[in-house]
Amino acid sequence: MESSVTRFLKIVLVVAALAGALWILSAIRSTIILLVIAALLAYILDPFASYLEFRGLSRTTATIVIFLLVGIVIFTVFYFLIPALSREITGLQKGLDGQSTSRLLNDVETYIKKAIPLLQDQDINLQGELQNIIKNIGETLFSLLVNLVPLISSVVIIPFAVFFLLKDGRDMKKQLVSMVPNRYFEMTLTLLHKIDEQLGSYLRGQFIDSTIIGLLAVTALWILDVPYYVLIGIFAGLANMIPYVGPFSGAIVAILTVLLNHGSGQDVLYVGLAFLFIQLIDNVVVQPMVLARSVNLHPLTIIFAIIIGGQFFGIIGMLVAVPTTGILKVLARESYTNARRFNLI
Amino acid sequence: MSDEALWSNIFKNKDVKRENIFSVLKRVPVFQDLGYKEFKSIERILHRRLYKAGEVIFRENEPGVGMYIIEQGKVNITVGRDNKLLVLLSNGDFFGEMALILSGKRTASAIAQTETTLLGFFQPDLFNLLETNPKMGNKIMFRLSQMIAERLRLGTLENRQLKARLNTLQAELEKYKGENSNGK
């Protein structure tokens, strides 16, 4: 009797501890996401630090050099892009009030009513809907960035965390590994190495691929004089992480923007061709060079991951959803195979 | 006999007492060519592990990823289910260095005989070293290949002797059989 009571107590205690841990985790989730972003960035930058070490610098100097370089790049990019970006967002919110747009939307409305007789008497009010959507996008984009994690603290904390993770990451890893019991020690070491091998190339690949596609898209749209070229370019770069759907969505947004701004059929054609060309470069040149095929995520998995990421952590959650799912997949797969190799299961 | 060439420390310097990590490392042939500064960085890479008497360090047929150096204590190297003792290693000895290059299954088990402190040096760290400090990594790799070549040479010699012995025994057996059938 007593043993079953103690067992029951134990179970209650474990469940309570788990619930407590979950509660704490959800309470500090904005801090966790900061740490995840910092860890991802440090992880992506790690090979550069190693390379500088190979050139003879100490780890600390290497980290400082990387920080200076990245700082210069970020400053330059933002110096040129921020004014354009803020102009674009305010423009985007106002843009739909313009007469030309409402005329176009009215045309579309009449066309839909003609094509689908059922909707004849309904008030579709495309313009209002679209305006709402775009206003919301603008608002959520900023409110999420600003409110979820106060912008200033993330601007300070992320680089701070990245610096120390980059400088001391290896020692931290060694400290963590030293706490693993002897029986699982070699397995843990192998596991970490395998995960590192696969994830490293995967995450760096995704990062480089997205950056290149984003830059190409921004440049192409800027040459073609498409409005909101910075926003659409960034979106295209990020969306490119999603297989099949991603590349199209960038192009569709760009084409819709051209249409809404009364671009001619020729303009649409050019934008379409530009995206086709970017995809070609991506598939033939960039992806074979940078993307590791070891972490093949099913498109359906990715879409659900993005939705879940968005539910929990907003826009930032959606951005880190794909790499995080990759990490989880490699983690699960390697843990399983290693446990089998070491006869643990 | 061939196990001897694989597992016993044929590079051992006999006068061993309790000492600091640098003098332990200095006697390990893999690190022989390293300077003081390089020893410092090796020390940062090594994993110090404590084992109780009787605790298994690794088991035969389990995948292995690196070598261990005995900083303090005694380790039994055994094979088979009945843990047949191949060799007893002590302070300054090392084992499992083959796994640094060939990440296959361990060919013997290692069990701590007394309370033991080991320094682990593992393949991922060696790879990392080859990337970040190739000069030092190459010094280690070269010594490692030398050691393995030496073990191979000894193994081949033993193999040759065993074959010769086998041939003699076979010849004797044939002779014995011939004599027996003649006798009938």
Image (cartoon, coloured by chain):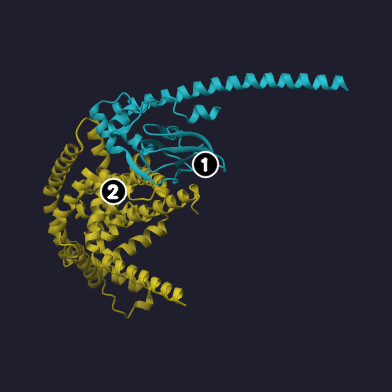
Residue drawn at the location 27% of the way across and 59% of the way down: A256
The residue most toward the bottom is A121
Number of numbered callouts drawn:
2
What is the chain letter for disc 1?
Answer: B
> Where is mark 1, residue-wise?
B61
Crowding around mark 2 (Cα neighbors within 10 Å: few <14, some 14 to 19, many 20+) is: some
In front: B112, or A176?
A: B112
In front: A77, or A283?
A: A77
Q: Which chain is yellow?
A: A
Amino acid at pointer 1 = Asn
Residue drawn at the location 35% of the way across and 34% of the way down: B126
> Where is mark 2, residue-wise?
A270
Measured as percent of width and height from the top left, residue B95 is found at: 43, 34
In front: B58, or A281?
A: B58
Mark 1 and mark 2: Cα distance apart in space: 62 Å
Q: Nearer the viewer, mark 1 or mark 2?
A: 1
Question: What kind of element bears circle 1?
Answer: loop
Measured as percent of width and height from the top left, residue A203 is found at: 32, 47
